[in-house]
Amino acid sequence: DLNLSPGDLLLFVLYLQRFYFPVVFLTVYYQHFQSGFAATERFLALEDVQPTIIDPKDPIPLPYNPRGEITFQNVSFYYNPGEWVFRNFNLTIRPGERLGIVGETGAGKTTLTALVMRFYDPQEGEILFDGVPINKFSVREYRKLISVVFQDSFLFNMSIEDNIKYGSPNTSKQDIIEAAKTVKAHHFISNLPQGYQTVVGERGSNLSSGQRQLITFARALLKDSKILILDEATANVDAYTEAQIQEAIDILMSKQKRTSIVVAHRLSTVEKTDRIIVLEKGKIIEEGTHEDLLRKGGKYAALYNTYFKHQSVEWEPDWED
């Protein structure tokens, strides 16, 4: 028989807890250690990745006063060997031209813009900027010529002001405000608790999709680049927000006759371009102005009637039909 006093029993239980606590802690710590070790391994593997898009040994200086002509010469490109996105593709975008690109999913619209930005190099052929292959320029210096607004806008976890001036770090506060006013973003920014100093959260999580897109338009306007790329930039906004930024898009495309490439999702954006090309399986099957392509009654007219026509403010449904 154990003759334990209440005090001895209490001490025994306390000693038992003190013994098991480090054991439990070690098991939990070991799980964290394993997770951290795996994350470190992935990080080091990423650090060892060698970029394929690199500067040439002797980069050519960019033109002092670039014209903004982009030329595809017999370009062939694939993501996976044998699965060609473009094959002997040719296209010239004239200086200051506003080019609209339409086509069904998988036609190669976004790939074309990615090649212009030199996110990839084609397996065959060349892409020229003002007559010089873009792989002859410094990657950093060449991309300074380009402003891009994607469908899924990306904002950093910092203030609205810092996000707008991200591509133009030395700009003044007044220029930032003027850019925001131009794209109709100043009103909602001013109504935020901290105004332009409001922190937007990771990937802009504290703002709506339309507000995030307006900020990226202000960023593109402020950078004032020679080449502007809009990759379905109004696809994630409602009709009211689109109406707000349509004027800003016109200003972006027309200011200083910059070369603009517009991957179209909304009619109001594509119909105002100087020329529209219709892509299908990496080939240009039609090109011309909005009115010309409608008169032809081809692929663009079919896309217009299927996807675009109902977006026009003049459109009225035929209820009898």
Image: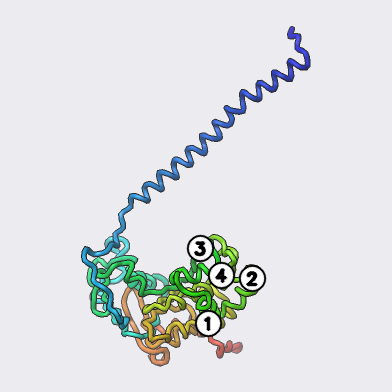
* Residue drawn at the location 49% of the way across and 37% of the way down: 33
Measure how far apart labels 1 and 3 are at the Cα level: 22 Å
Check disc 4: other Cα within 10 Å, few if <14, some if 14-19, many if 20+: some
Which residue is the site of mark 2? 192
Which mark, residue 209?
4
Q: Amino acid type of disc 1?
A: Thr
Sequence order check, earlier mark of 4 and 3: 3
Q: Which residue is nearer to you in this view: 319 or 72?
A: 72
* Figure check: 312 above or below 124: below
Q: Amino acid type of disc 2?
A: Leu
Looking at the image, can residue 87 be seen? no
Sequence order check, earlier mark of 2 and 3: 3
Say which of marks 4 and 3 sits in front.
3
Measure how far apart labels 2 and 4 are at the Cα level: 16 Å
* Residue drawn at the location 59% of the way across and 30% of the way down: 24
Sequence order check, earlier mark of 4 and 1: 1
* Figure check: 67 above or below 194: below
Which mark, residue 295?
none
Measure how far apart labels 1 and 2 are at the Cα level: 18 Å
Quadrant in which the N terminus appears: top right
Q: Residue 226: which quarter of the image?
A: bottom left
* Residue drawn at the location 48% of the way across and 71% of the way down: 165
